[in-house]
């Protein structure tokens, strides 16, 4: 955590409003967000919980354990406040209008879009531009995110990737 904060040039958590934790569980990606603005732990998952599955059956105690672990870190490293005030945050499983169990392939794409567009608002107020079961939209987002990852300056091969992309585009009249 210290390394990530240093890399992001965050010297204090005093004014941090949202802390994101991408979660991978059994090949499924979802997002936990510690939301200091609302005093909540927001579970942001593109998939629905449908009976007989329950919240506890799907997530077990992982969200609360993550919150407790972060509270320990927050208190020990940054003396930022009362540890129990963070562990007392209520858990909210956001019920977004684009949630669906029709797409089991793009949870990583949803996770990236959620991280990019979520600012702590309620599910009703949040509009990331996602449409329920729009598979063409998911294809476009996959291409967009792959391009960003391949061409990003943190990618040691980004110059090679940009060069190969330009060559491919010229050869394919793109």
Image (cartoon, rainbow, N blue to C red):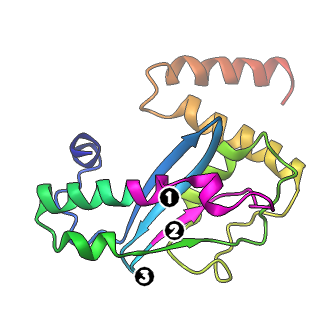
Instruction: Name the disc covering residue 42, or none.
Output: 2
Q: Position of residue 60 (x, y in %)?
A: 55, 53
- The residue labelled by disc 1 is 32
156 relative position to 13: left or right: right
Instruction: Look at the image and tell me whether residue 28 can be seen.
Output: yes
**Quadrant showing the C terminus:** top right
Q: Are marks 1 and 2 in contact (CB under 8 Å)?
A: yes
**Front one among 101 and 153:** 101
Between residue 44 and residue 159, name the one nearer to us: 44
Left or right relative to 39: residue 25: right
Instruction: Report the magenta residues as a range.
Output: 41-65
Task: Name the residue that disc number 3 marks.
Answer: 38
Magenta-span inclusion, residue 115 = no
Tell me the quarter of the image containing the N terminus.
top left
Vertical relation: 16 (above or below) 155: below
Q: Which badge, 1 or 2, is on the more N-terminal residue?
A: 1
- For image coordinates 63% across by 36% down, the residue present is 26
- Do the CB atoms of the residues marked 3 and 2 lie less than 8 Å apart? yes
Instruction: Report crowding for label 2: few under 14, some 14 to 19, many 20 or more residues within 10 A (C-alpha).
Output: many
Mark 3 residue element: loop
Upstream in sequence: badge 3 or badge 1 = 1
| x and y percentages locating residue 63 in the rendered image | 47, 57
Seen at 59% across and 81% down, the residue is: 122
Q: Position of residue 78 (x, y in %)?
A: 13, 60
Image quadrant where residue 7 sits: top left
**Element type at marker 2?**
strand
Residue at image position (58%, 29%) is 150
């Amino acid at each position: 955590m210290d390394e990530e904060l240093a890399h992001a040039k965050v010297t204090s958590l005093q004014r941090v409003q949202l802390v994101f934790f991408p979660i991978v569980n059994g090949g499924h990606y979802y997002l936990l967000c510690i939301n200091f603005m609302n005093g909540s732990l927001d579970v942001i998952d593109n998939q629905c919980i449908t009976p007989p599955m329950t919240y506890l059956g799907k997530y077990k105690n992982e969200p609360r354990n993550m919150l407790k672990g972060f509270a320990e870190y927050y208190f020990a490293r940054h003396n930022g406040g009362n540890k129990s005030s963070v562990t007392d945050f209520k858990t909210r499983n956001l019920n977004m209008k684009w949630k669906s169990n029709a797409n089991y392939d793009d949870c990583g794409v949803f996770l990236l879009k959620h991280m990019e567009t979520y600012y702590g608002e309620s599910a009703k107020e949040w509009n990331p531009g996602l449409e329920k079961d729009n598979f063409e939209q998911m294809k476009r987002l996959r291409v967009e995110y792959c391009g960003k990852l391949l061409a990003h300056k943190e990618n040691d091969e980004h110059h090679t990737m940009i060069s190969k992309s330009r060559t491919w585009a010229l050869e394919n009249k793109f």
